[in-house]
Structure formats: structure tokens, C-alpha cells
Image (spheres, rainbow, N blue to C red):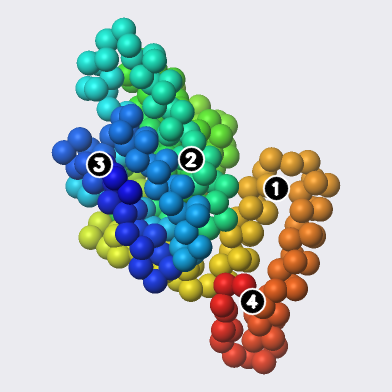
Amino acid sequence: MDLATIDYRTQDGVAHVRFARPEGANAVNPTFASDLKQVMLEIEFDDAVKAVSVTAEGKVFCAGGDLKEFNEAGEGLPRLATAMLGDFHAAIYKMNRIPKPFVAGVAGAAGGAGLSLMGAFDLVVSGESAKYTMAYTRAGVTPDGTSSYFIARHIGLRRMLDLTLTNRVLSAADAEQWGLINRVVADDEVDTATAELAASLAAGPSWALGMAKRVIYNGYERPLEEAAEFEGVTIAESMSRHDGQEGIAAFVEKRAPEFNGE
């Protein structure tokens, strides 16, 4: 892939995605949005990838939209934003629908579109000094990046309104308490902890993990009966596969399971 703002490599079943425009605080612009969509397509169709680790270079995970570039667009900004969001949202849709776990490692800060993007990951590891803020209305604009869907579900409507209308800044401890992130580590351990978590998932029962992700998200979007039906169909299929049968046998026999991803 020809990527200008993201570094991408794979190793031992893990796709390592690293935002690589620290001089621009890894802000979202048309190039970044296009690169992110390309990366998601690569992950989707690479069967060797079982889990994904996403980190960033520099002091900021993602500062949000590239306001400098937006300002330079002048009257063409609405067109630029519409085209950019076509790619940015498409990348997030892909990330959510791909049946592989995505783990983000946030160091420094995630604001605006960076926070929105972070909210769409399956798991989030945070540095202890990281800060989180919506920031949109501070710039006189409204939220994007699927934040109204994911973040509102993570933290609840009342807290979502607080973040959005007041631009409140959350510490890592606050964000963990609110359910916005999963775990907090020392700042210098973020990259390692994120990669290790992704590696542990890649070594697990990958079909079951991917389908468990679908079951959970499906349950948010469907009526009770439809959610339960999908659960029943999926667990029955998992029990017909190697990893399901191996996991059950290993539990009964009091030994470590030997998963092969099938």
C-alpha cells in the first residue's frame, strides 16, 4: 500500500497500524481518511491477520480534524469535509464489521475526531496521563466520526451531552471510570501493552472472538428476540468447530486449550 500518514506491518497474526504524522498531531485530513480506509480493506482481506494493534507516533494519538487544512479550504470546506468523511466513516464501518478484535493504544491525547475514532475500537489501552475531549463545539462545529453512535453507547446519553456541549476534558482515570477506555498503563508502556493485548487475542480462538464481536454489536442494534436468535445460531456453530470442541474438552480435562483459529 502507498500510505502517507500511516505505517502498516503484520507479524504473527497481528496487524500493527501506527499513525505516522506526529508533526501534524496525527490529525484527520483527506489523506489520513483515505489511508485509513485502505488499511481497513487490507485487514479485511488478509486471512493471516487475527487481531489489530493501533498506536500513534508523537505526543498525541489524534488531535481531531486538521483545522489548519480546513481553514485553508475556504469556501470549498463543506465539499472537502463531505468527501473526507466518506472515507473516514467507511473506514470505521469496516473496522466495526470486520470480525477481528481491534485494540487502540492512546498516549498523550485523543480529541475531536480522534476521540470519535477511538470510541469505535473494540478495546482501548490508555496512558496514565492521556486526556480526552470532544472539542467539536469549541470550534463551532458538530460531532462526526460515529461518536454519536459508539461513544454515547459507551458512556450514556447524559455524559455524552456533557462532553459534547461543555468540551469537558477527561483524565485517563475519569475515562476508565466512565467506561470510555478499558485499562490504564504507564505512559511508556502503552505501545507494548497494546501490542501484547492484540497478540494474546490473535493467539486465541479467532473465529469465536470475531463472531463474539459481531454478537455483541448485533445485540445493541436488534430487538431482544432477534439478538437472542443470533446468539443461538452463532454459539451452535461455534460448538461445531474445532476451537469450540477443543475449548470445552480442555476445560473438562483441566488443561490448556490448543486453538487453531477454526
Image position, residue 250 (x, y; %): 64, 86
Can you tell which of label 1 and label 3 is closer to the viewer?
Answer: 3
- Which residue is painted at 56% across and 67% down in the image? 206
Q: Amino acid at mark 2?
A: Ile
- Which residue is painted at 80% across and 60% down in the image? 232
Question: Distance of mark 2 from mark 1, alpha carbons?
Answer: 19 Å
- Mark 2 element type: helix
Q: Amino acid at mark 3?
A: Ala
The residue tagged 3 is 4
Q: Residues within 10 Å of mark 2 (few under 14, many from 20)?
A: many
Q: Residues within 10 Å of mark 3 (few under 14, many from 20)?
A: few
Determine whether, in the image, residue 38 is placed left or right of residue 4: right
Q: Amino acid at mark 1?
A: Gly
Q: Earlier in the sequence, mark 3 or mark 2?
A: 3
Determine whether, in the image, residue 157 is placed left or right of residue 129: right
Q: Earlier in the sequence, mark 1 or mark 3?
A: 3
Mark identifier at residue 243: 4
Can you tell which of label 1 and label 4 is closer to the viewer?
Answer: 4
Mark identifier at residue 92: 2
Q: Quadrant of residue 215?
A: bottom right
Q: Earlier in the sequence, mark 3 or mark 4?
A: 3
Q: Earlier in the sequence, mark 4 or mark 2?
A: 2
Q: Amino acid at mark 4?
A: Asp
- Which residue is painted at 44% across and 47% down in the image? 40
